[in-house]
Amino acid sequence: LAKGIVNADGTPGPNFELARQRIGSDRGEYHAVTPSTGEYATLPQPYTTYATGQPGGVPDTRFPTNLPNGPFQISRYVPYPAYTGDPVHRFFQMWQDVDGGRNDKFVWVEETIGTGSNGKPLPAGGFNPREGAISMGFYNMNPFTDAAGAAHSGDEPVFKALADAYASSDNYHQAVMGGTGANFQAIVSGDAAFFTDPVALDGNPAVPFANQIENPDPVEGTNNYYTQDGYGGGSYVNCSDPSTPGARSVRSQLLQQGVTRANCASGHYYLVNNYAMYWNQSSSNPPHLIDATHFTLPPQSNPTIADVMTRHGVSWKYYSGDRGSDSSLASVDGIPLFFHSYCGICDPLTGYISIMRNPAEEAKLQNYQAFLADVKSGTLPSVSFVRPFEELAGHPADSTTSLYEMFIQDLVGKVRANEELWASTAIFITTDEGGGYYDSGYIQALDFFGDGTRIPLIAVSPYAKPGYVDHTYYDHVSLLKFIEENWHLPPVSARSRDNLPNPIASADDPYRPVNGPAIGDLMNLFDFSRSQGD
């Protein structure tokens, strides 16, 4: 909106051309930045993918076949609470989406490789990822008129009300290019997970099974059909070796942006997408299975913010919706059982030796019912991580933003109802990643893993600056920096991203640090000398 790409009512703005999507060419070797061979006359029709209540993997006829080439408002064509398709959001794909800062290859990536090849040869007749242009959709908090002529007051009313009453950031980023799993690892460690010895289970680095190593180089004779990538394929990369497929191009991009430290330890194969945790708590995905056919991250030995807090006497818990798939316990929390579901990769501390082999630490991993009980009794720890039930987490296709709003509204209301608790609380509301949707914002190069695109962040607290919008550069590791600043803790490790300095904003552009790589500690969202209750 600020760039004039769209108008306040969601229609194309005077600078709509800035978001035009282009057709790329990548043959022979993976390139994060690709030459353009043309532009889309109109956007391909979005697909349903696996959207709840919709036929799977077909063109979504609720959307036009001739959408203009640029961002489109989803809620002009379907009701705001409706389920829609899931855009592509994987590591090497997102590097290509962003295209060196031009942000013009989101559709081309969805059309050529989608969520990956899983190591399969190119199908006869070509490959159709069945995505279309889902990634170009957006929601609109401003009043608008839908395609049928009906007037609406705006999408995301809960988030808008919270942002108006409290503080928010418009320069907060997912920490890793791509999807959920790697970003949750960054949230707890400020770092990336890596493949470890699947036999000794001691946390020492090892070489993964061949079919689990990323190879985004295009299959011979194809345009961008990756050799080995997918949720049932490659997700590990040895980025310390520039000859590794994909690594050369990403590292070249870093150097072009002045970043000389890729932060890739020698001989480490880092997880850049989604694999199950070794001690996964879901009964539908049994733990302890590590082989070429089970896509499981072996036990991790690198330190986490949980280790730092425990070592320095700061109490903490990680509450994950339906942890253990225990619906009998979770059914008492007032949320219908239909929405109860557990996300194993969203419960990242279940992958760490220091937590799961220490009963006292493992006991701090609890479900949402335990969170509600702790709120009611006023016994929350100093630091709480809360991950919603999967169907209430706002993920495209299996959830909606309106369901996430429902969850957040209930959580905030329950915390506020305990006046003593509320008086000393700050609630950070965000998402693990941007879902693969287009964004026009600046992305700072920090290391091999990211940053990624912008995502929302709202700070709800009696000390939050009312209605304040902060332009300081942040990402998920800023949450760790906030914890460390507030409780006077050291960084997680010598290599974790929380060692980066706080940004110094440019006088000409407050979104771009002049001392990068740099990420903030979120303190600017607050005025701790007063509270909104004063």
Image (tube, helix red, strand yellow):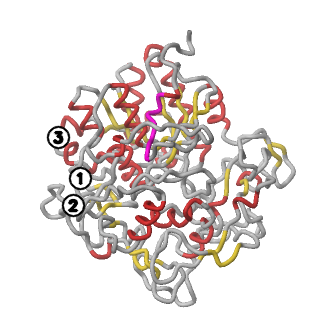
Label 1: how many Cα within 10 Å (few below 14, some 14–19, many 20+): many
Q: Which residue is mark 1?
A: 300
Q: Which residue is mark 2?
A: 196
Q: CA distance from mark 2 to mark 1?
A: 7 Å
Dot 1 amino acid type: Gln
Q: Indicate the position of residue 470 as horizontal and vertical percent values.
A: 58, 33
Residues drawn in magenta: 517-523
Instruction: Give the mark toward the camera: 3 or 1.
Output: 1
Dot 2 amino acid type: Thr
Q: Indicate the position of residue 296 as horizontal and vertical percent values.
A: 29, 62
Label 2: how many Cα within 10 Å (few below 14, some 14–19, many 20+): many
> Would residue 87 be found to the left or right of residue 385 on screen?
right
**Whether label 2 touches label 1, CB < 8 Å:** yes
412 relative to 329, above or below:
above
> Would residue 285 be found to the left or right of residue 337 on screen?
left
521 in magenta: yes
273 relative to 215, above or below:
above
Q: Indicate the position of residue 465 as horizontal and vertical percent values.
A: 57, 23
Tell me which residue sits at (26%, 59%) in the image. 265
Q: Indicate the position of residue 469 as horizontal and vertical percent values.
A: 61, 32
Q: Which residue is mark 3?
A: 358
Dot 3 amino acid type: Asn
Quadrant in the picture for residue 165: top right
Q: Secondary structure at mark 3?
A: loop
Secondary structure mostly seen in the magenta stretch: loop
Q: CA distance from mark 3 to mark 1?
A: 14 Å
Tell me which residue sits at (49%, 85%) in the image. 122
Label 3: how many Cα within 10 Å (few below 14, some 14–19, many 20+): few
354 in magenta: no
Q: How many marks?
A: 3
